[in-house]
Image: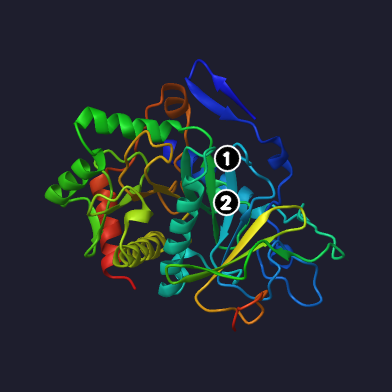
Amino acid sequence: MRRFNELRGEEVVYAVARQDRTFLPDAEHCPLCPTRPGHPPTEIPFSSYEIVVFDNLFATFEAPQGAAEVVVYTDDHEGSFSTLAAERAEALMWVWRQRYEELAARADIDYVLIFENRGVEVGTTLHHPHGQIYGFPFLPPVVALELAADGRLGGCATCALLARELADAERVVYENECVVAYVPFAARWPFETHVVLREHRASLVECSAGELKALASALQRLTRGFDRVFARPFPYVMVVHQAPTDGRGDGHLHVEFYPPLRSAEKLKYLAGCEQGAGTFIMDVMPEASATILRDVITNGP
Amino acid sequence: MRDAKDTSDARRRVEANVAIPPLVPAFSPDPSDPPLTPAEGPFEQFGPLLLERLLKDDGRALIRFSRAVPADATLGDGAER
């Protein structure tokens, strides 16, 4: 169920059943672990698996008005996206692509949001390595802002910003043959990082196999770097940005990370100015964050 | 003063989050639930992956993605391990 907030000009989604969703269970009660002989079934009825996607029991959106899916990266309860084997991370890119393609074909879905909340600091409720996919029955405001930026800059805003970051070079933290990662010029989070395809690809569907492999590699290099910044698991929100699926706009595939840590123990909060005025105040310059990140990525595994 | 306060608040927040005791999960399926049924044929190919589609007893869809046929896959006509 959703209501339109007139003052903000945006939709608010009410999914009250989620109030009772599974909350930080221990490994013995993890619903994303394999179902093991002699134990009660989990959400996944296999004794082992590689990657599984299923409809979220505590759905934010449901057919015929959207979708909410859980993407489980591994049957190993421990670890994270960064610790997956390289071929598993590459396979995950294909899974994302398949889900985007299938959900995009549905008439009730205008936008496919692929994301991961890592860490209790950003609200994860299950520790097992996983992400989520929402099929939005409307165009969410962040995507509308990206389309507006395209209009304002007279073309693909992400292409223009990528060119600027490559020219500046100061905030670039990692590059490979297909992908560039940088802390954006006007980052809103201490270690906000954008991982961008060099070529204009509207979505994962347009990527070559080589680009998917390069994207997986870049994402893993970055997230491994994150964990080295403060020598601790680094919480983040990871969001895949792609073209809307309602046919109303283009897009440029990129992955944005919003990490809330500004030091090993200090969190960036969305407080009065951010929530009341919509203006982010930053304690760290993007160039300083980029220097740190580039160092840990360059010198890390 | 500001740093001290922020550090304290941040630490409390992090510790509070970490220290939350695990609860019995809300998801607790009945072991006597009927088995899952294949939604369609045993496998589809997508890029380098095999897809195995199932429907849970409550109607929710589940897809297993694998690089090779899993040893315990639900096989249908024509499928090979």
The residue beneath circle 1 is A66
Q: Amino acid at mark 2?
A: Val
Residue furthest to the right in view is B32
Determine the residue located farthest toward the front in the rendered image.
Answer: B78
Looking at the rendered structure, the secondary structure element under dot 2 is helix
Relative placement, left or right, of B33 versus A30 is right
Horizontal and vertical percent position of residue A79: 53, 68
Q: Give left or right: position of A156 versus A66.
A: left
Amino acid type at mark 1: Gly
In-image side of A1 versus A227 (left or right): right
Question: Which chain hosts label 1?
Answer: A
Position in image of residue A174 (x %, y %): 25, 60
Task: Tell me the subunit letter for badge 2.
Answer: A
Which quadrant does the N terminus of chain A fall into? top right
Residue A166 horizontal/vertical position (percent): 16, 51
Q: Secondary structure at mark 1?
A: loop
Residue that sits furthest to the left in the current view: A167
In the image shown, does A33 or B6 lie closer to the viewer?
A33
Q: Which residue is under mark 2?
A: A120
Whether residue B56 is visible here, answered yes or no, is yes
Q: Is residue B37 left or right of residue A82?
A: right
Which of B68/A37 is in front?
B68
- Using the rendered view, name the quadrant where residue A197 is placed: bottom left
Q: Residue at x 53, y 65 (%)?
A: A73
Asked whether residue A236 appears in the rendered view, the answer is no
Give the mark nearer the N terminus: 1 vs 2.
1
Q: Could you tell me residue A32's position as x and y percent? A: 65, 63
